[in-house]
Image (tube, rainbow, N blue to C red):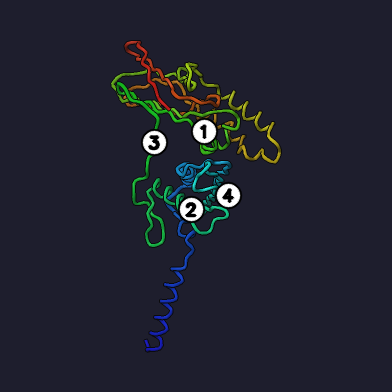
Amino acid sequence: MTVAARGWAACLSIVLVLAASCTPVSQSYQIHSDELSCEEANRVVYAAVEDMGMTVTSMRKARPGSPGTVHAVGKEGAVVGEGNVTIRCEPDGVHIEADEPGVTTSHTFERGIYLSVTGRTGLTRESGTLKREQVPQRPAEHGTTGGGIRVVLEPLRGFATVLDFEADLSAAGVLPVRVRVVNESRRTYDFDPADVVLRAAGSRRRVRPITPDHVVARLDRALQEAPAETAADLGDVAAAREIVRAKQIRAARLEPGQEASGFLYFEVGRYDRARVTLLDVRTGEIEGFLVEF
């Protein structure tokens, strides 16, 4: 290589370094990874918004080839007023971009979404791309353990219901509760979901689950009563009708090492405790488990 050529190459290298250093800060908080599924991306973005203490006001779930969006607003006095997140699931991977309307310098929202998503998924930046090199964080569970039985309940509120049911069940007045009962004992137990009750906050009133048919009727009524311009905000009601029935937890006899999982449905309300009872098949005794929310 001639001296002139070497000089030109050196100049070109400097230009490239300078160009790289001028990458907008907002782009450095974009997430591009081929190690996230579309389903996982939807869930971690929703969780990331909640991590920032914000409230989701609208959500469209991302699907392969169809982008999803999340819009959230901050509570009074919050650092971030509002923010939008776009999720695209393409053949080359998942792409997540956050934006805080009207703000061009702080990038607080973009940084918060980036840190939460990468922290929850175990993604780390390597040579400009994000790779999963850490164990993803497990979400916190509301549960109790006793006598070798583990009981976990998780109420889903607001647009979080879209993640599991394709439609906003909360808008229809329905609170889905994810239930998981694990038999880690040496005994056999009978589990009947009809025996699961919630306690209304600040009272002794017990609330029992409603049936999937009742849930579907509420969804249909909400769709009929919604103005034409906002009906789409409910989500895919047709799909939800089938999912609600398919995901209902069933009665089961739990041998040692077995578990039952699924959803129960309640009317939307404020609840502070759940009670789950199991029948010991050998002794006929009933054992109760309390789960605090």
Q: Nearer the viewer, residue 272 or 176?
A: 272
The residue under label 1 is: 157
Query: Height in image: 63 above or below 167?
Result: below
Decide which of tag 2 and tag 1 comes sooner along the chain: 2
Label annotation for residue 110: 2
Q: Viewed as shown, does residue 280 lie left or right of 194?
A: left
Outermost residue toward the left in this view: 186
Outermost residue toward the top in this view: 284
Q: Quadrant of residue 181?
A: top left
- Mark whose residue sits in front, 2 or 4: 2
- Mark whose residue sits in front, 1 or 4: 1
Q: Residue at x 37, y 45 (%)?
A: 136
Q: Residues within 10 Å of mark 2 (few under 14, many from 20)?
A: many
Q: Viewed as shown, does residue 70 lie left or right of 14?
A: right
Q: Residue at x 59, y 28 (%)?
A: 173
Q: Of helix, strand and loop, which one carries label 1?
A: loop
Q: Amino acid at mark 4?
A: Ser
Q: Amino acid at mark 1?
A: Arg
Q: Amino acid at mark 3?
A: Ala
The residue under label 4 is: 66
Query: Height in image: 179 above or below 17?
Result: above
Q: Of helix, strand and loop, which one carries label 4?
A: loop
On the image, the x and y values in percent for residue 238 come to 62, 34
On the image, the x and y values in percent for residue 174 come to 56, 28
On the image, the x and y values in percent for residue 260 come to 41, 26
Q: Of helix, strand and loop, which one carries label 3?
A: loop
Decide which of tag 2 and tag 3 comes sooner along the chain: 2
Instruction: Give the alpha-carbon distance from disc 1 to disc 3, as whole Å.
Output: 15 Å
Label annotation for residue 140: 3
Instruction: Give the alpha-carbon distance from disc 2 to disc 3, as whole Å.
Output: 24 Å
